[in-house]
Image: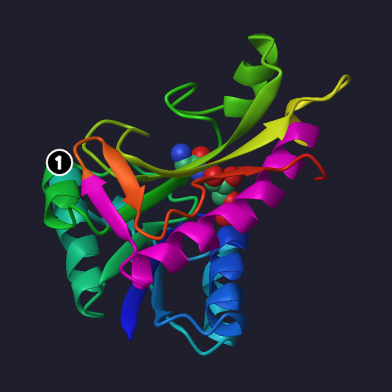
Amino acid sequence: MQRIVVLISGRGSNLEAIVRQSVAQDWPGRVVAVLSHKADAGGLAWAAGQGIATAAVDHRAHATREAFDTALADAIDAHRPDWVVLAGFMRILGDGFVQRYAGRLLNIHPSLLPAFPGLHTHRRALEAGCAVAGATVHFVTPALDHGPIVAQAAVPVRAGDTPETLAVRVLAAEHRLYPMALRWAVRGRLRLDGQRVLQLDGEPQHLFCEET
Ligand code: GAR
């Protein structure tokens, strides 16, 4: 069984989708621990209620980013992960951390990367006049919200959309996209080919979420 450690900062709705689908679809992998830099992250309580190990590593207790990254990595490694999954983890991780988990560190970002890395993605997509928004699952590299793309979900922008209404529809798409990508990961169906990620069964690496 592949071991997945999930890092969160907040409510953890992507975490919930991953846990539920991993069980419902009987993946050869399970979420074995959920960690956060915030002890009050909602997803930690949810995970604990599911019987999943949880821990908080408070970034404010560490003088430097490197010290925090090392403490976080120690907490992660205690669970011997095959995959480390960032699901709404809103802290920048240093190069050493990223290198340590190279090839097994995934992130989801609420835009069609490489457009709109960083914050306020939905507001920026609307301001830019985008007709399509979406989300991206990617391998993490030292550059923020950057790295080989595993899968993307496209969501149409509708007349009258606000950042809030768009965020709701993109989040619903994320709840399909991230479990799909992780199911491939734990089944060993992903290969890196330079900057490209190959899905070895030839499954489409995109979702078009018109209905949400
Ligand atoms: C999600 O929309 C995720 O894509 C985003 O935070 C939200 C977390 O929601 N992540 C980023 O912006 C990372 N750059 P959740 O806690 O309900 O899963």
Residue 65 among magenta residues: no
Q: Which x, y percent locates residue 44?
A: 52, 71
Quarter holding the N terminus is: bottom left
Q: Residue at x 25, y 70 (%)?
A: 76
* Mark 1, secondary structure of its residue: helix
Magenta extent = 165-192
Q: Residue furthest right?
A: 160
Q: Which residue, given by chain and number where applicable, does mark 1 sit on?
A: 95
Name the amino acid, label 1.
Asp
Q: Residue at x 60, y 50 (%)?
A: 174
Q: Main secondary structure of the magenta part?
A: helix
Front position in the image: 147 or 91: 147
Snapshot quadrant of residue 135:
top right
Instruction: Left or right? Give the position of 35 relative to 127.
Output: left
* Quadrant into which the C terminus falls: top right
Crowd around label 1: few <14 · some 14–19 · many ≥20 (10 Å)? few
Q: Can residue 109 be seen in the rendering of this structure?
A: no
| Residue 103 left/right relative to 23 | left
| Above or below: residue 47 compared with residue 11 | below
